[in-house]
């Protein structure tokens, strides 16, 4: 999280972090019509239950919001499952860290625009 926050700050991209699926849904409800441009999941975070939440988000958000997941490079099964439930991109943790500036630049909204939820 610290790396995401630090990179976002350098790029002047607004990010928000949530600790559970309930937090995410509440934040999205509070934002109303304003949808995040990017949602990033640590696919090993069971507090958020990403494989259950991603299909719900995909049906709710339709187009305009990308969902990226990251995981350990040895978790091939989890990577496949994440793609199957609707994750747009799944990266090994190292590649995610390396490509984070480009991902935030491409998908992130400026600090005063719509939020990017993490």
Image: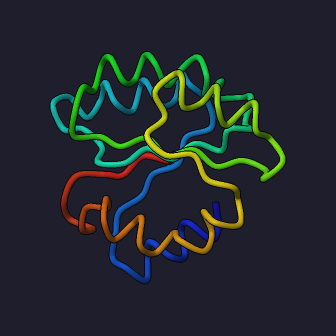
Q: Is residue 27 above or below residue 96?
A: above
Name the side, left or right, on which 12 lies relative to 99: left
Residue 85 at x, y percent in the picture: 52, 21
Q: Position of residue 74 (x, y in %)?
A: 84, 47
Identify the residue at horizontal 37%, vertical 79% (top origin).
11
Q: Quadrant of the N terminus?
A: bottom right
Residue 102: percent from left, percent from top: 41, 73
In this figure, what is the number of numbered marks?
Answer: 0
Colouring rule applied to residues:
rainbow
Q: Residue at x 62, y 37 (%)?
A: 19
Height in image: 10 above or below 60?
Answer: below
The residue located at (57%, 44%) in the rendering is: 69
Residue 67 appears in which quarter of the rendering?
top left
Q: Where 49 falls versus 116 (above or below)?
A: above
Task: Judge from the rendering whether residue 56 lies leftward or rightward of residue 41; answer left or right.
Answer: left
Seen in the image, is 56 located left or right of residue 93?
left
Q: Residue furthest left?
A: 33
Q: Which residue is located at x 42 percent, y 65 percent?
A: 103
Q: Which quadrant of the structure image shows residue 4?
A: bottom right
């Amino acid at each position: 999280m610290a790396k995401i926050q630090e990179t976002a700050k350098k790029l002047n991209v607004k990010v928000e972090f949530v600790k559970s699926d309930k937090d995410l849904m509440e934040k999205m409800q509070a934002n109303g019509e304003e949808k995040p441009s990017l949602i990033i999941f640590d696919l090993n975070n069971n507090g958020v239950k990403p494989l259950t939440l991603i299909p719900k988000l995909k049906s709710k958000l339709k187009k305009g919001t990308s969902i990226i997941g990251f995981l350990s490079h040895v978790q091939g099964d989890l990577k496949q499952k994440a793609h199957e439930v609707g994750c747009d991109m799944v990266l090994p943790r190292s590649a995610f860290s390396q490509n984070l500036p480009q991902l935030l630049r491409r998908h992130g909204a400026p600090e005063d625009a719509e939020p990017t939820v993490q």
